[in-house]
Image (tube, rainbow, N blue to C red):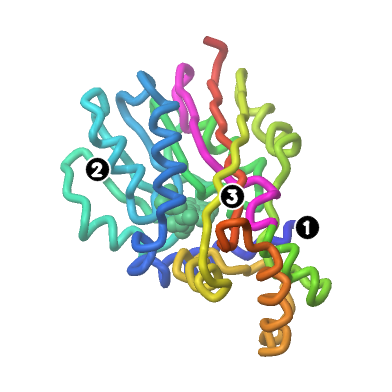
Amino acid sequence: MSSLPSVAQVAQAFSQAAQHYDAVAGLQRQAADHLINLCGSYLRGQVMDIGCGTGYLTRQVLQQGAVTQVLGVDVAEGMLNWCREHINDSRCDWLQADAQALPLAANSLDLMVSSLAIQWCADEQALFSNISRVLRADGRFFATTLGPDTLAELRWAWQQVDDFQHVNEFVPQAELLKAVQPHFSEVDIQAHTICLKFDKVSEILRELKQLGASNHNLGASRGLTTRNQLRTMTAAYESLRDEQGKLPVSYQIYTISANKCAA
Ligand SMILES: C[S@@+](CC[C@H](N)C(=O)[O-])C[C@H]1O[C@@H](n2cnc3c(N)ncnc32)[C@H](O)[C@@H]1O
């Protein structure tokens, strides 16, 4: 059984985060920039941005002259409302939908992109079969998602407190590949790590909350975190300061490139 929160819980957390998301989403912008470079000449025709959030990647897609239409899809109404207020382009539409159950016709899109969203989908079989179904035969899918070494320092610091799952779990590369492969004829997954630096543990926790990415796993403790637990975790994290006196926060980024049919 997946330890991920339900789609409704994910939608609620990200809807609440919409107003503050852009102020703290530097890492998310880096991942989206990386993804857009990878898409290259496949940025054309009708494109879907899955889990569009506040639309940073959607805007980048819209800047490509060969793109005729973009559909930004998200489960979080708050995120879509933000996009409707801030992105005004006649080629763009917004749809509230779950990426695991896309209400779209088969063979209807040229390209599907997604940045740091699919790690919230518990049903990988439904997710990747939907993406493949909606793509045209020569369609491509490019995505970034998170690997299990993401937030390794925070996970370790909480492990010094108790055995509960305080940090979201992410699927390893081999498992991800196994989930994508049945639905595409060619798949490539690359990994790289981005390490952010912070001055205070409290800033790390605040930023995760503002991103809507605090822990909602089923393995999380049901009770509230006590001050004592927080102090113990903070002391453990403090021991990880680097030579510059900064606290590291690692994000392991997986980049997926997939062709529906052989090129
Ligand atoms: C970390 S944000 C990333 C947003 C944007 N792609 C970016 O790079 O800034 C993840 C987004 O995925 C959306 N999301 C999560 N699960 C989803 C699902 N099952 N279907 C559609 N969107 C989903 C969330 O609501 C949220 O807006």
For residue 109, which quarter of the picture?
Answer: top left
Name the magenta segment's main secondary structure.
Answer: strand
* Residue 97 appears anywhere in the view: no
Question: Magenta region: which residues?
Answer: 134-152
How far across and how far down the image is residue 51, in percent?
45, 50
Per the rendering, the mark at residue 1 is 1
Up the image or down, 191 lies above or below 100; here it is above
How far across and how far down the image is residue 105, in percent?
43, 35
Kindly report the distance in space between the C-alpha atoms of the residues bearing marks 2 and 1.
Answer: 37 Å
Up the image or down, 16 lies above or below 47; here it is below
Does residue 147 show up magenta in the picture? yes
Residue drawn at 44 percent across, 44 percent down: 50
The first of marks 2 and 1 along the sequence is 1
Q: In the rendered image, which residue does mark 3 sit on?
A: 251
Kindly report the distance in space between the C-alpha atoms of the residues bearing marks 3 and 1.
Answer: 24 Å
How far across and how far down the image is residue 190, in percent?
61, 30
How far across and how far down the image is residue 230, in percent?
67, 82
Residue ranking furthest to the bottom: 227
